[in-house]
Amino acid sequence: MSILQPSDRGEQRLPDGVVVASFPTYAEAQAAVNKVSEAEAEIRGLAIVGNDLKLVERVMGRLTWGKVAFNGMVRGLMFGVFFGLAIYLLMPESLQSAFILPLLGAAMGIILAIVTHAMTRKRREFSSVQQVMATRYDIVAPQEIAGKTMHVIGQRAAAAPVTTPAEVPVAPAPESPQA
């Protein structure tokens, strides 16, 4: 018998449970889960679910041949520095490769960046950053811990204490009038 829940094994399905709170930002939803954790309430099974996903692409600027070549040079240089240091650490006698590989990496980076840009020139002449965002973040809790979670987050008032029949106060019987 496995102690892992199906979602722990990578199963692609939405979490089961009750939506105990909704927030406009991920940071607020994360803070609410932290609040539940700090209250030492059960948090296993809680999930933050982003709803109404949107793909946002922010344009950073126009791509010019100079920017393309510079960015390719920087990427290639970093790649060359990494391999140059790795080879130097493995074979300390090859010090010249620690200096040659970054230069070769920079040259290859420039060439690859220019060739790639030339192939996409008419379709994409700008640089951008893509981001997937949600318009609402729900905290979903299993049915067993939903009430306690709502209380800790502050989405509802404290539950009324349950009293047993032995604890129910008994009102005194009214006195009968004496005539």
Image: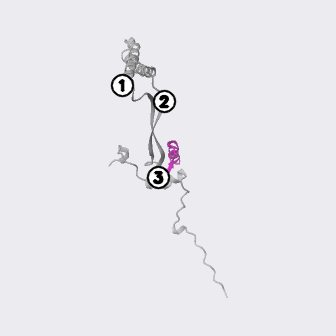
Residue at far left of view:
1
Residue at far bottom of view:
179
- Taking the spot 50% from the left edge, 51% from the top edge, the residue there is 21
Disc 3 versus disc 1: distance between alpha carbons? 48 Å
Compared with 177, 155 (above or below) is: above
- Taking the spot 46% from the left edge, 54% from the top edge, the residue there is 145
Q: Secondary structure at mark 3?
A: strand
User: Does the image show residue 4?
Assistant: no
Residue count near mark 2 (Cα–Cα under 10 Å), binned few <14, some 14–19, many ≥20: few
Q: Amino acid at mark 1?
A: Met
- Taking the spot 38% from the left edge, 13% from the top edge, the residue there is 97
Q: Which residue is mark 2?
A: 60
Sequence-first disc among 2 and 3: 3
Q: Secondary structure at mark 1?
A: helix
- Taking the spot 45% from the left edge, 20% from the top edge, the residue there is 66
Total tally of numbered discs in the picture = 3
Which-is-in-front pick, marks 2 and 3?
2
Checking the image for residue 119, the label placed there is 1
42 part of magenta stretch: no
Sequence-first disc among 2 and 1: 2
Residue 55 point in image, percent of width and height: 44, 39
Part of the protein shown in magenta: 18-39
The residue closer to the viewer here, 125 or 82, is 125
Q: Which residue is mark 3?
A: 19
Residue at far right of view:
179
